[in-house]
Amino acid sequence: MPDRPLSNIRRLTIAVAAFTAFIVIGLLTIGKPKFKYKVSSEDMLSQIMKADYLVSPEAAKELMAGDNTQVKFVDLRNKYDFNIGHLEGALNIPNHTLLEKDNLNLFEDTSITYVLYGQEHLDANGPWMVLRQLGYSNFKVLQGGYAAQMADSLRITGDAAIYDYTSILKEAEKEIYDLQKVTEAPPPPKPVKKKVVKVVPKKVVEEVEEEEGC
């Protein structure tokens, strides 16, 4: 029997994808298109409902562990986020560059399956639908996106940090603290209590000369 929570998540994913498809397909049909679309709206919705374009976290883990050269992961996030961390061996092709000529030429190699992913699951749904509309059938979507892979502790790689930002932050905090101490007005001097000295008069003993006898 399939796990009920997972089944609910799957149905929710399909529903959201279908809703997104209506929006994307609507946008693609406004005005004169720059590209020629090869998949009808009906076929697009049918493929979304099948959900066979999704790659589960478990399947992704197996693909990366097996070093399958026929499958490549495509990170749709910006270069900054990609450098912080990404799936091992992933290509960084940000969303806004996906339809550039060089990238489309790369995707022509149908012997390779490209698995799209963004930070969240829905970040890759729109790009997948656009590419599918253009006739590219060698694309899939990583279910859950990069965030889900982090939670699932998959093989994540990132560039080594050039700077120790924790130490830099602590040093900056210390400098700010020292600067504040210098610029602060000095506290008013404490009133000096006058020491009361009790003066005791010295007793003077007068010497009395004895009178000489007659």
Image (cartoon, grey):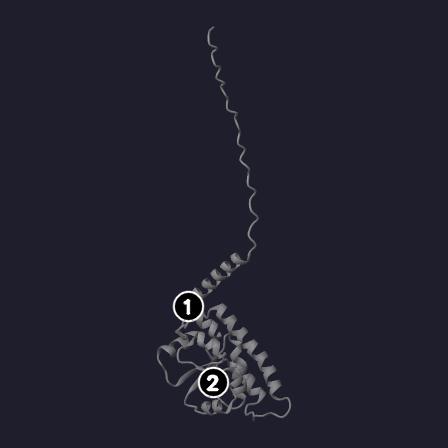
In this orientation, which residue lies closer to the viewer: 43 or 36? 36
In this orientation, which residue lies closer to the viewer: 190 or 133? 190
Q: Earlier in the sequence, mark 2 or mark 1?
A: 2
Secondary structure type for disc 1 = loop
Q: Quadrant of the N terminus?
A: bottom left
Q: Is residue 198 above or below residue 211?
A: below
The residue type indicated by label 1 comes to Asp
Q: Is residue 181 above or below residue 106?
A: above
Tell me where residue 91 appears, x and y as whole percent.
44, 82
Q: Residue furthest right?
A: 31
The residue type indicated by label 2 comes to Phe
Q: Is residue 194 above or below residue 133?
A: above
Q: What residue is shown at x 40% (from left), y 84% (from top)?
A: 71
Tell me where residue 206 appears, x and y as whole percent.
50, 18
According to the picture, the residue beneath numbered tag 2 turns out to be 139
The CA distance from mark 2 to mark 1 is 39 Å
According to the picture, the residue beneath numbered tag 1 turns out to be 164
Secondary structure type for disc 2 = strand
Tell me where residue 15 appears, x and y as whole percent.
56, 76
Tell me where residue 32 appears, x and y as whole percent.
63, 93
Tally the numbered discs. 2
In this orientation, which residue lies closer to the viewer: 134 or 195? 195
- Mark 2 or mark 1, which is nearer to you? 1
Residue 47 seen in render: no
Q: Quadrant of residue 157?
A: bottom left
